[in-house]
Structures are given as structure tokens and as C-alpha cells.
Image (cartoon, grey):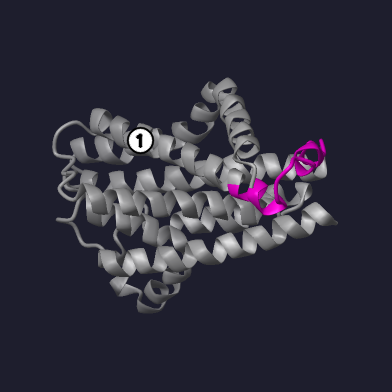
Amino acid sequence: MNWRTFSAMLARDAHVARRNLWALMTQTMLQPLLLTFVFGRVMTSSGMMPASYKGILAPGIMGMSMVLTGIQAVSMPLIAEFQVTREIEDRLLAPMRIEWLAVEKILAGMVQALAAGAVVVMAAWLVLGRGVGMSMERPLLFAAVVLLVALFAGAGGLALGCSVGQTQIGLMFSLVLAPMIFFGCVYYPWSALSGFPVLQKLVLLNPLVYASEGLRGTLAPQYPHIPIAAVMAALVVIDAGLIWAGLKKFNGKAVS
């Protein structure tokens, strides 16, 4: 592979992201920060929710922000480039295999997902104040989970971007992303669904569950969470499946 070409394409996507930084940050960060403030600060300070809810909420919001940012950062430009502007055709002529262009898209999405996660977790500490209950006692395990979540976001964005038509974008958000968020253990731990045993088992099909529970287990291990070993195994399988599906879809659209 031509590493210079690969690096140049990655640098181009980074430049585009920097140019649209404020719009991207507003689009992806506003909702998570508002949710953090309302549920984590207003509801707990008023006594409507216990103070411990801050530590349960913050990792879930971080996972949601990473996943949404990575998916949008990869899928939306791909939909436009394949179906509207056709800009992708110029890059398909670059001196490297088509698959590496898809890998570059995944890496670009991962970087933006990691940036979103860092912003949200730092803002959570500022917005929620004392009693957040988050710690970095296991930094290597935390880093491994974060990288797997970022890879899920980038690979998921590639698979969706190559599968959804321009007229189906609204459907993607309403039928895919919205249910994934509400049943992704963002606002509650997986154990909270014990009163709904069928639903508790069904949500295990939702990849966001493992992102939320993995970050909860490494950032706030004192709260209930799915065992980290099970989370990481599930994320590895999910990531591998999405990478395979994304590369296959991308190659099919590129050569059609």
C-alpha cells in the first residue's frame, strides 16, 4: 500500500473536520451536554434523583456521544460522496487498493469519536460537579474499551453510509439510531432491566449496550455493569462484523 497516499487522505479528512469543527461540535455535543445538565445536575440537585445517578449517567453519555459522532462523521459524507457530489470517484483513482480508502474512513471516524468522548467526559466533570464518582483506576482497560467503542463507531458509520440511500437518512435516525440510544443502557445500567427479562435479553443485540456498560465498568466500576471481559469480547465480535460488512459494501458501491 502507498502509505503517503493513505496519510494524505487522512490529513485531508482531518482538515475538513477542523474547518467544520464548531458546527460538528455543536451538532454532536449540544444534546449530550444538555442531557447531562438536566438529568445529572438539575434532577439530582432537586432531589428527584439520587446523587449517585451522576456516575451512572456520565459514562453512558460518553458512549452515546462517541458512537453518534463516529457514525455521523463517516456515514453522512459517504452518502453525499457516493450519491450526490460523486467526489469519491477522484479518491478511488488514488494509487492504493480500494479497501484502504474504506479503512481511512474508519480511522477518521475513530479520531472524531475519540475527540467527542474526551470533550464529553471533561465537560461532565465540570457540569456535574462533585459526586460524579468516576475514576481512572484501570487506565489500560479503559483505553482498550474506548478504542473498541471508537472502532465500532467508525466501522458502523462505514456500514451505514454504504447501505443507506440519501432519501433514507431520516429513516436511519428514527428506526436505527433512536432505538439504539433509548435501549442502549445510556441512561441506566443493564441490570435495571431485570424487571423486564425478555427486553433485558433482547437489548444485548444492541451494540451501544456494550459501549455504555464497558465505559461504566471502567470509569465507575462501583455501579452495576456487565462484566468487562464479556463487554470486550462482544465489542471485538461486533467490530469485526461491521468492518467485514462495511468493506464489502464499500467495495460493491465503488466498483458498481
Rendered residue at 16%/44% (across/down): 133
The residue carrying mark 1 is 118
Front position in the image: 44 or 168:
168
Rendered residue at 38%/61% (across/down): 210
User: Which quadrant of the view contains residue 249?
Assistant: bottom right
User: Which quadrant of the view contains residue 250?
Assistant: bottom right
Instruction: Evaluate whether residue 191 shows in this view.
Output: no
* Image: magenta residue range: 85-103
Instruction: Evaluate whether residue 58 shows in this view.
Output: yes
Front position in the image: 14 or 120:
14
Left or right, 113 with reference to 250: left
Left or right, 72 with reference to 52: right
Percent of width and height locating residue 46:
20, 37
Percent of width and height locating residue 112:
49, 37
Left or right, 102 with reference to 95: left
Front position in the image: 176 or 117:
117
**Circle 1: is it few (<14), some (14-19), or many (20+) Cα within 10 Å?**
some
Percent of width and height locating residue 206:
47, 65
Name the element at disc 1: helix
For the view shown, which residue lies furthest in the right direction? 256
For the view shown, which residue lies furthest in the bottom direction? 198
**For the residue marked with disc 1, what is the amino acid?**
Ala
Rendered residue at 56%/47% (across/down): 106
Left or right, 56 with reference to 206: left
Instruction: From this view, report whether residue 226 is shown above or below residue 187.
Output: below
